[in-house]
Image: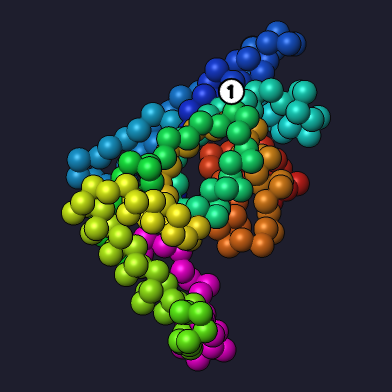
Amino acid sequence: MIKVENDKVWGFEHAIRGMRNPMNSWDKSDSCWTLKEDESPINPNDEPFFEVGKNDLGLMKRLYKAGTEHRKYLRQIFVSMDITAPLYWWKEFDTYKVGTVANSCSTMHKIAAKEFELDDFSWEQLLNSGCDLIEYTWQNGSFKKMVQPLQLLTDFIIPSLNVCREKYLETKDKKYWWQLIQLLPSSYNQKRTVTMNYENVATMIRQRTGHKLDEWRNFVEILKDLPYVREIIDGSET
């Protein structure tokens, strides 16, 4: 599971101005601010929108194809978004450290803030009824239980986390907090506010298209829908 909210893009105006500095071609720029009209006739909320002109977009595409040393303008176009995704996805996202900043909800400080629920986890691919059973053994082999992976999460892991949470809240004993930290599955969903630039976006699209994880494939499609991303890369990596 991956969810993106509150996405915002800015920086086209100064990026295009800087893009034209090397050739002093500012007079050829045809981009401008306009209003994005709200279709609602009641209390319309028209928003300023920077529209990239045909000349500027053509140059952006040519510089993009020329390579990273020529498309420096991409690093001056920024995007911010709130991303909720499982920890196993965040471990791969952390590969992109250069040019990205993220503030996350803290498992260290707030892991016991609320009771654990199924929707706190990404579980869509876990086997459920009708699939092959998986055997789990407890108590040195003296007890065997045939359960589905989803049942393991709902009937054992989540209840165990909640018992440790209650004990920690009751006693403030750090040993119960450690149970939460070390038992927490990598399918636990964490929210982060991320800021990055369009060079990061282009790199992720290039490297993660067709990835094994559903979360990456879905995220790539979200990135492609950001303003002018598809136009800039001209279909070469979509």
Can you give x and y, in whole percent of width and height, for residue 110 in the image?
31, 45
**Residue placed most toward the observer, 210 or 33:** 210
Residue placed furthest toward the bottom: 130
Question: Residue 128: horizontal and vertical position, in percent?
Answer: 47, 83
Q: Residue at x 50, y 58 (%)?
A: 186
Above or below 139: residue 13: above
Position in image of residue 59 (x %, y %): 71, 27
Give the image quarter of residue 27: top right
Q: Is residue 127 magenta?
A: yes
Quick one: 71 or 3, which is closer to the camera?
A: 3
Q: Which element type, helix, strand or loop, lies under badge 1? A: helix
Is 146 placed left or right of 168 in the picture? right
Of residue 201 and residue 169, the one placed in the foreground of this image is 169
Residue at the spot x=27%, y=37% of the render?
45
Q: Quick check: 126 above or below 36?
A: below
* Residue 42 x, y percent position in the rendering: 19, 45
Q: In this rendering, would 230 be left or right of 87? A: right
Magenta region, residue range: 119-137
Disc 1: which residue: 76
The quadrant in which residue 73 appears is top right
| Amino acid type at image mark 1 | Gln
Query: Relative to the observer, which residue lies in front, 33 or 193?
Result: 193
Q: Is residue 133 magenta?
A: yes
Q: Relative to 61, does residue 28 appear above or below in the rendering?
A: above
Query: Does any portion of residue 106 appear in the rendered image?
Result: yes
Helix, strand or loop: magenta stretch: loop
Residue 231 found in image quarter:
top right
> Up-down: is 181 above or below 127?
above
> Would you call the spot at circle 1 few (<14 residues within 10 Å), some (14-19), or many (20 or more)?
many
